[in-house]
Image (tube, rainbow, N blue to C red):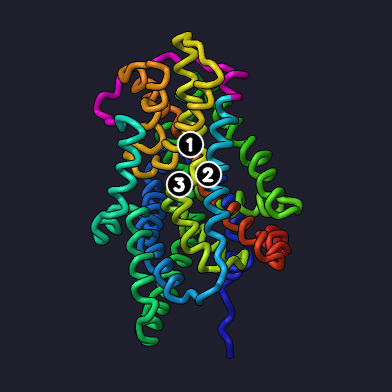
Amino acid sequence: MTKAQHPLIKLVNSTSLVSQILVGLVIGILLAWLAPEAAKSVGLLGGLFVGGLKAVAPVLVFVLVMAAIIGHKQGQKTSMKPILVLYLLGTFSAAVVAVVASFMFPSELHLVANSEQLAPPGGITEVLQTLLFNVVTNPVKALIEANYIGILAWAIALGIALRHASDSTKAIINDISHGTTLIVKAVIRCAPIGILGLVSSTLATSGFDALFGYAHLLAVLLGCMLFIAFVVNPLIVFVKIKRNPYPLVLTCLKESGITAFFTRSSAANIPVNMALCEKLRLPEDTYAVSIPLGATINMAGAAITITVLSMAAVHTLGIEVDLATAVLLSVVATISACGASGVAGGSLLLIPLACSLFGISNDIAMQVVAVGFIIGVLQDSAETALNSSTDVLFTASACMAEDKSLLDVAPNAASEA
């Protein structure tokens, strides 16, 4: 005789994860409003959730990529080349949109104290060198530091080297892959509680008072990100799959963007994205590589942040910008954004690099970085949501263009969300 489920467990199992996350969000806001001190304590739950995702993500990426390459059959198609093109096109488009928006709605800053303890890169060459050195790093160090470029490089190398291993070795790696995936699914199920903790502690500690002085700048930043998410990206996907892109776009924003918004970490959102790719029935050979790679180089949100804040500094100082320099800024922002995840402090510390195009001193540029940290409560959250959800969006659209049978999966996934 089967034991009856507890009503609460039954309710949780019958409710979608997105709905549970929204409930956690509302409870977190109410807790921060009604009991700020208690909300700060609940922040421990959010920290544990993000810590769990960050802990499992490097192992997941390493094992899944290696297992996917080992299990790849000769002649089997992957969609990596078109995905890379979409990543670069999306990031460059975001930089162009940010430049246009900055000309149409110029922002000016009240520059604050310097942040001399931060160390921005000295130029594009340094950013590219950092990426190259990340490729040849020690594999154990790469896993410990969540260096996804290094993790990918070692996983690909070992996967190729073990292509001709014995069946028993391949079976063991495959079993480890499935076991890691089960752990990831268990961590993701804790998302509603984790987001409750993240929201309540953030609002109780920071609030939104500091944001009001930068309302115009935030409006330009968030407006660009929304425009990319709901206009530019759907247009790119439509060209790729020749079908209404919005069911897929909305599915990616709901199931990937929401969690990324609150975790504020593309790396932590890798397990969420891989689970969504599995739900969309995408080939594991492709998404096992494209999702962690996207978390490293697909940075439309970072390109917007770098461009808008750099242009705000330009307008504040009254510097004239011609078309050629604006185009160059878009290119620099695209390249810099691809290296953002490998630099401590993320996209904000690449602002001095973009500012140097206009002859703006490092001292002033670092004041702009400080402004970025002030508005980071919303800016960084929205940037991560755009970056991470686009990883799945472009991976799915490239796979769907290759395999038309996948086109009907996105609407079904949207209805289940």
Dots 3 and 2: beta carbons under 8 Å? yes
The span shown in magenta is 100-119
Residue type highlighted by circle 1: Thr
Numbered circle sitting on residue 297: 3
**Side of 353 where 318 appears, left or right:** right
Q: Which image quadrant for residue 169?
A: bottom left
- The answer for how far apart the CA atoms under marks 1 and 3 are is 9 Å
Say which of 366 and 196 sits in front: 366
Q: If the image is split into quadrants, where does the C terminus sit? A: bottom right
Badge 2: how crowded within 10 Å, few (<14), some, or many (20+)? some
- The answer for how far apart the CA atoms under marks 3 and 2 are is 8 Å
**Side of 356 where 246 appears, left or right:** right
At a point 57% along the width and 45% down the height, the residue shown is: 26
Image position, residue 354 (x, y; %): 41, 26
Numbered circle sitting on residue 88: 2
Residue type highlighted by circle 3: Ile
Numbered circle sitting on residue 203: none
At a point 40% along the width and 83% down the height, the residue shown is: 171
At a point 39% along the width and 69% down the height, the residue shown is: 66
Task: Please tell me whether mark 2 sits on a helix, a strand or a loop.
Answer: helix
Compare marks 3 and 2 and give the one earlier in the sequence: 2
Image position, residue 384 (x, y; %): 49, 43
Q: Which image quadrant for residue 53?
A: bottom left
The residue to which callout 1 is attached is: 334
- The answer for how far apart the CA atoms under marks 1 and 2 are is 8 Å
At a point 38% along the width and 59% down the height, the residue shown is: 152
Dots 1 and 3: beta carbons under 8 Å? no
Residue type highlighted by circle 2: Leu
Image position, residue 280 (x, y; %): 62, 64
